[in-house]
Amino acid sequence: MTGEAPSQETLRRLLMDCHRIAVVGLSSNPARPSYRVAAYMQQQEKDVIPVNPHETVVLGQPAYPSLSAVPGALDLVTVFRRSEEAGAIVDEAIRIKAKAVWLQEGVIDETAALRARRAGLEVVMDRCWLKDHRRLFGEQGSAAKSVGS
């Protein structure tokens, strides 16, 4: 973890309170980490919105080509893209007034994280949503066990 590490309280609050979550880079391939994490999010009763210009439907939800194309407000933008692409995604999250951004494991952009924090967004970087959820809340039902991480 680099940069400002979120407190356990902040992680817990984001995991609990963020219900409408855009997953940028969500793939329809079940072998991809983005698919497994998003499927787990759905099992936790989160409203998962796929954002991927190369997909039409993922996990039964319509996919959007960009964050700006997603109708309505977003609680959280989760990023499954290379670090060098994270900055533009974070900037778009700021423009659409998302409440928080979560850069998945291996996705690190300190400058983008700073821009997001200065714009009032909460930032989690280089962490896995699924792993943190399981660590803080344990397995949530038998369906979650089949997802894996």
Image (cartoon, helix red, strand yellow):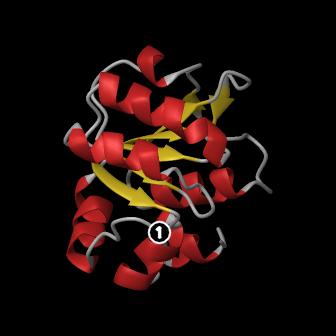
Is 91 or 148 nearer to us in this picture?
A: 91
Q: Position of residue 114 (x, y in %)?
A: 34, 48
Q: Residue at x 49, y 72 (%)?
A: 1
Asked whether residue 99 is in view, the answer is: yes
Relative to 35, 50 lies left or right: left
Q: Residue at x 32, y 22 (%)?
A: 95
Q: Position of residue 14 (x, y in %)?
A: 28, 60
What quarter of the picture does the C terminus occupy? Answer: bottom right
Q: Position of residue 74 (x, y in %)?
A: 31, 34
Q: Position of residue 136 (x, y in %)?
A: 36, 82
SS for dot 1:
loop
Residue located farthest toward the front when viewing the structure as drawn: 111
Q: Is residue 76 above or below residue 3?
A: above
Q: In which quarter of the view is residue 98 placed? A: top left
Asked whether residue 24 is in view, the answer is: no
Q: Residues within 10 Å of mark 1 (few under 14, many from 20)?
A: few
Hey, what amino acid is under mark 1? Thr
Is 16 or 110 nearer to us in this picture?
A: 110
Q: Is residue 87 above or below residue 43?
A: above
Q: Which residue is mark 1?
A: 2
Q: Residue at x 55, y 55 (%)?
A: 108
Q: How many marks?
A: 1
Q: In which quarter of the view is residue 8 placed? A: bottom left
Relative to 40, 140 lies left or right: left
Relative to 121, 126 lies left or right: right
Q: Residue at x 56, y 70 (%)?
A: 143
